[in-house]
Image (spheres, grey):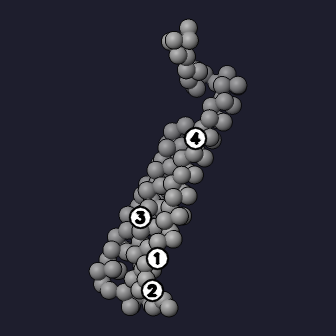
Amino acid sequence: MMGSVVDIPLWGAIVVAFFLLIGASLTLIGAIGFLRLPTFYERIHAPTLGTSWGIGGIMLASMIYFTLSSERLVIHEILIGIFVTVTTPVTLMLLARAALHRDRAENDDSVPGKFRNDRES
């Protein structure tokens, strides 16, 4: 049975608060980068790092809190972390490729041309 927040030791509460603040800060930095960067291609990078590293801090805080409050090892959050860490970069890479294909089809001059390998010439 889970206890209340008062039941966890002070050192555990400090560690949980630290990882929560780190995770939330990294996620906030990713969100601010998403808002401030001017182009779609530059915006792709910030949320990927923010969610991947931010979820890591929040996941660690959750694992520590529930391990201390339930007095048993709780590690099922690792699956959530793995899923988010794997899917977020892949999804944003596919979005970037789709946008690049669309912009090239529209002959947008701000988009780089296709990469040509010197050996193919």
**Residue designated by label 3:** 57
Query: What amino acid does circle 4 point to?
Result: Met
The Cα atoms of the two marked residues, 1 and 4, are separated by 32 Å
Asked if the residues shown at circle 2 and circle 1 are in contact, with their CB atoms under 8 angstroms apart, the answer is yes
* Count of numbered badges drawn on the protein: 4
Asked if the residues shown at circle 3 and circle 1 are in contact, with their CB atoms under 8 angstroms apart, the answer is no
Quadrant housing residue 13? bottom left
Which of the labelled discs sits on residue 119, or is there none? Answer: none
Query: What amino acid does circle 1 point to?
Result: Val
Asked if the residues shown at circle 2 and circle 3 are in contact, with their CB atoms under 8 angstroms apart, the answer is no
**Residue designated by label 2:** 70
In the displayed structure, does residue 23 sit left or right of residue 120?
A: left
Which of the labelled discs sits on residue 93, or is there none? Answer: 4
* Residue 95, percent from left and from top: 63, 41
Q: Earlier in the sequence, mark 4 or mark 3?
A: 3
> On screen, 115 above or below 55?
above
The Cα atoms of the two marked residues, 4 and 3, are separated by 23 Å
Judge depth for marks 2 and 3 and give the one in front. 2
Camera-side residue of 39 and 104: 104
Q: Earlier in the sequence, mark 4 or mark 2?
A: 2
Q: Is residue 86 visible?
A: yes
Query: What amino acid does circle 3 point to?
Result: Gly
Q: At numbered mark 2, what does the secondary structure look like: helix, strand or loop? A: helix
The Cα atoms of the two marked residues, 3 and 1, are separated by 15 Å
Q: Residue furthest front?
A: 73
The Cα atoms of the two marked residues, 2 and 1, are separated by 8 Å
The Cα atoms of the two marked residues, 4 and 2, are separated by 39 Å
* Residue 66, percent from left and from top: 45, 80
> On screen, 28 above or below 47?
below
Q: Is residue 62 visible?
A: no
Query: What amino acid does circle 2 point to?
Result: Ser
Which of the labelled discs sits on residue 74, or is there none? Answer: 1
